[in-house]
Every structure is written in C-alpha cells, then in structure tokens.
Amino acid sequence: MVLRIAFRNIFRQKRRTILTALAMIVGFTLSSVFIGWSDGAYGDIITMFTRNRIGHIQVHRQGYLDKPSLYKTISDYTAVGEAIQTIAGVEAWTPRVFGAGLGSVDERSTTVQIVGVDPVREIETTRFDKKVIEGRTLGDTPSHDIVIGKGLAKTLSATLGSEMVLFSQGADGSIANDVYTIVGILESGDDATDRVTCYLNLEDAQELLVLNGRIHEIVLTVSKINQVPKITKAIETRLNDSTLHVAPWQEVAKSFYRAMQSDKQGDAIGRIVIMLIVAIGVLNTVLMSVLERTREYGVLKAVGTKPTQIFRLVLSEVAIISLGSICVGALLGVLANHLLSIYGITLPEEFTYGGVKFQTMYAEVNARSLIIPAITVLLSALVVGLFPAIKAARILPAKAMRTH
Amino acid sequence: MNLAEKSDVIVTDGVTKVYAADGIPVNALCGIDLAIRQGEFTALMGPSGSGKTTLLNIVSGLDDPTEGNVWLAGKIISDMSGNELSDFRRDNIGFIFQAYNLIPVLTVEENVEYIMLLQGVPKAERHDRVASILEAVGLKGLADRNPPQLSGGQQRVAIARAMVSQPAIILADEPTANLDSKTGADLLAIMNRLNVETGMTFVFSTHDPMVRESARRLITLRDGQIDTDETKCSG
C-alpha cells in the first residue's frame, strides 16, 4: 500500500513531478554525454598515441626505461618476439634500436635521435608507412636509405635525395659514421619528435651502432586495449626472464598517462557540479511536496502508519521518479552518444594532446556512460530525499493535522 | 495485554498542555485526571477552546502532554517509541476527525482497508470486512469512488475506516459537525449500535445536542479543566 500511495502521489502534482524528473533527466543525459564524450576522446587519443607510436606493450632490458643506454640490449630478439606472438590477443610486434648522434646535410648539422626499425614489422605494428608524407618508406633490406622527420628536414634544409651524414658512438666504443640517402619525410603527429628523429633500416642502424644483431626495444600491439594488463602478465610468464622488463603503455608513457588521469579528474568535478544542480532541484521539489502534505502524513501516522513506513513512502516516491528519469535519460544519453560517435564534433582548430594532433572528437557508447549517471542520479536523489523523509517520519500527528 | 480485560481503558493523571502562541504560553489543559472505562459512550462537551480536541489528541498519543501521564490499556504512552505508539494506535484506536482526513489518492475501499493492510489482515477477510462496514454506513456500491466524489459521504468513510478494524476505543472529534442532521443521526445510531453490540469504547468531543442526548457519560470542560462529569442512569 505504501508503494501504491507513493505511485499515486507522483501523479497528483504532475507539473512538479515533471519538473523533478526533468532535472534528473537533464542531469543524467548531460552526465552520460560528458562521460561518453570524455571516454570517446580519450579512447581516440590513447588509440592514436599507442597505435602510431609506442604500441600497447614494450619489452626492454631491465632498467632501460628508467635510464636508456646503448648498452642495455636484448640479444635474441627474434626468439623473444616469436614467443610473444604466440600469446592470445597479441596482434603484431616490431624491434627497434635507438642511438643519439649528429646529423649533417651539406653545411647544416643538428643533434638527432637515430631509430632503427624493421620496415615490414613496423608497418604492421605502428602503420609506419602512413606517416611518410613525402617520398617513400624504408626498403625491406638494408640499403643506406633514411627517412627523416618533417621538422628535422626543415632544420637541415634537406630534401628527398639529399645525402645525410650521421655521426654517433658504436657500442664497441668506436666512432660511428656513415652516409645515407633521404628517401622519405615523415610526420608522426608529434612535432617535437619530428624535429630530431631519423629512421634507418634495423640492420643499417645495428651496423652503424655496432650492435651485432641486438636491439633495445620490442613494441607490440594487442587486439583489445582493455586486455593490456592481462597480456602484460601473460608475456612476463611466458618469457620468464628476470633480465627483461615488460611494460604496459601506461608505464612507458607515464607523463602522458598522468596528464590524462588529471584531465579525467577534472571531468569528474564537472560531473559533480551537474549532479549538485540536480540534487538541489530534487531537494527543492521533494521538500515542497512533503511540506504540502504534512497534514496527510499526520493522518497516516494517526491511523497507525509507523514512522519508518512514512520514511519509506517519501523515499519510494523519490526512487520511482528517479528510476523513471534514469530510463528516459539512458535513452537520450545512448542516442546522443551514438550520434556523436558517428558524426563527432569538428573543432575550429586542431589541437595536440600527447604529441598527437586532433581536430574531430568522437563520443563512445559504453556501460560506464550509463552506470555512473544512474548511480549518481539515484544516490543524489535519495540522499537529498533523506531530509524531507526524516522530517515527514518525525511529524507529530496532532501538529501536522493542524496545518493546511 | 488485552484491553477488554481492563476496566479503565484510558486514564489520565494530571495532564497539562501548554501551547506557546506567539511566545505567550496558553494553558490548553490544566491537570486533567480522568478514567474512561471499557464500553463507555462518552461525550466531551464545552465551549470552543475549552481543550476537548487537545485532550483527545493527548489521550491517543497524537500530541504530547506538557505535564502528566496517560495510560492506555495500562501502558504509559510517553514510554512507547514512535513505532510502538503507531502499532498501538493501529491495533487499539479508531479515529474520526471533524475534517474527515481521508487519503485523497486512495479510493473509498482503499481508505477503509488501509489499517487492516497495516495489520496484515488476509485479503479475503479485508474484502469481506470492508464490504460489510460500507454497507453498515450506507456506502454500499461506492467502494471504487474517490473520497472527494462523495458529497456528504466522506464522514461515513471516516467512520467506516475507524471501525473496520474493530478497535477497542473510538475517539471522535466533532464527528457530526459537518453533517446534516439526518446523516448525523444515522451515523450516531450506527455508533450507538456498535457500542452496545461490541462493547467498543467511544469518546466524542462535540457541541452537537444530538450526541449529548446519545451519550451515557457527559464530561464538560471549561478553560482546560473538568467542570462537570455526569453519568446518566441506564434505562
């Protein structure tokens, strides 16, 4: 009967119920779009950042990530890569070597980062070829070709076909130097990287740096990014090598990950503000409703309704309106996020996040964008409903029945 | 404890009620000592403001006395918790209010049935008892109406609601005040009959001479004190 009274009370003051529900529906939908949008945008950023550059998981010699060194290498990288490839969920892997040096084209020189890549595997793993904006990518075999970053080409006034001399230090302590032909100019999306980086065929780089078949890094991608922690553990188990360090992308790109988490916390504050607005609206209308029906609560108590039942009655009304609003809000939230996931929103100017350029942002339809607003709306409505419910439950019947 | 086993169902001891009206204390009741026995048909008389409604509210636990104690069925009601008092009212007291005080979102049948639902009476029994009491108060066939649709019939619903659970005590605050004389007389006859047949205790606050005629005990209040307390000779 308490539920029946609660349900009928909701339809007694239709305008007030609609206003309360509207506050909840708008709050839910805004919160849902906020989360869907945020998840979609961060999802895109993470995908671009990992797929284009660092991969989802990396393997190094222990200590390399904290303090990179020419000498911290992996010897039998093919065996390591093949072992990784057999793990379910791993899509592709590619080896890399790194070295620092001086690059010169004609009279111009600058410091460079030398990256040796296996062109075939790098294309499979990080779509290396798609980033080449002029010329061509590196050949499958070592041929003293070099691809340089767009910014580096500008610094050195280098063009396709120019000869570039690299000076570095070999792993054996010798002075390393050689001449390479610029066959491509690359734009990774990270201007800072493109100002200093040049790419060689893996074998050319190993020869220059006297690494004798050794590499510094294995980058791998997985089919589902949410499986990264599980696959990281699986790789550690499979390799069972204490000299190797398996790191997920969150560890590889610590500062990027931390910046993103901070941004997400900022989003949470936005959501809290939205829900506070909802809560104040709900408190106002529920309190009004209780005050208007003080006499009725007095009568209900007079005929034997327990204070706890009155308390439940008020909260039931709030819960019924909340659940109805959540259903409507969920429909609107899914619809809005679905449309935004297809059409996105194109910003007037592109922006760079984590070194990756973006202009169109897409939302995502996911469970989080429904569950979090649902819990928040229901909880905030019930919490603000507590005060009026307690007030109604503690009413002194005789005093309540004297009100009009 | 079964109320029917006790001779005095309501006892007040030095009950005083002081209201603060705009910060000025007003004595609504001053040291009321009263005992109502089981099966009595009692009328509380007196001019407006003499304390009749306040006394009814206090003896039923709807309001708290400023001083003094009230025993209902041998229990001091100020010792009861909120839930205990609600249960006690639900099971032992029926109320009839001058302003009806029906629940507007419930139908006539649901209003009458409400207390039995709180008591956990089985559905079939509830249905039978509601049908029977509605017939007794002249509302047969009107069970599905909403109270505001019953012109002049709302007090009948209130009486049916008060009596359907067969409480030991019926407290009625000006029950005939808003009724025409014929309806008032009909309802009074119903209550009189129930009093005689079931031994229910009735306490009315009233100005109505008709109620005064029917009552077998007349208590007159004046300025918050008992002025006279007369019991009519039976027969």
Image (tube, coloured by chain):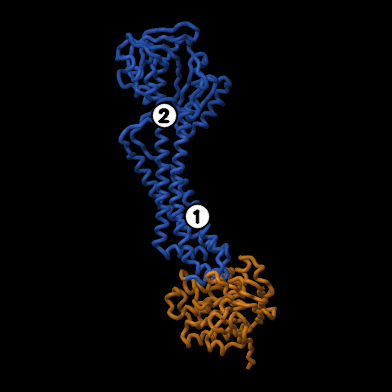
First in sequence: mark 1 or mark 2? 2
Q: Decide: is B77 above or below A373.
A: below
Q: Can see residue A233? A: yes
Q: Chain A is drawn in which colour?
A: blue
Mark 2: which secondary structure?
Answer: loop
Q: Decide: is B39 above or below A95.
A: below
Give the residue displayed 62% in from the left and 72% down from the top: B65
Q: Can see residue B200? A: no
Quickly name the residue at label 1: A384
Q: Decide: is B11 above or below A161.
A: below
**Amino acid, disc 2:** Gly
- On the rendered image, what quadrant is the C terminus of chain B found in? bottom right
* Disc 1: host chain: A
Q: Decide: is B209 above or below A152.
A: below
Q: Residue B59 carries which label?
A: none
Of residues A378 and A365, the one drawn nearer to the viewer in this rendering: A378
Quickly name the residue at label 2: A354
Between label 1 and label 2, give the one nearer the viewer.
1
Position of A323 with respect to A310 (left or right) is left
Q: Residue A41's spot in the image, x, y percent?
A: 39, 36
Chain letter for the orange part: B
Q: Residue A288's spot in the image, x, y percent?
A: 46, 62
Mark 1, Cα crowd under 10 Å, few <14 / some 14-19 / many 20+, is many
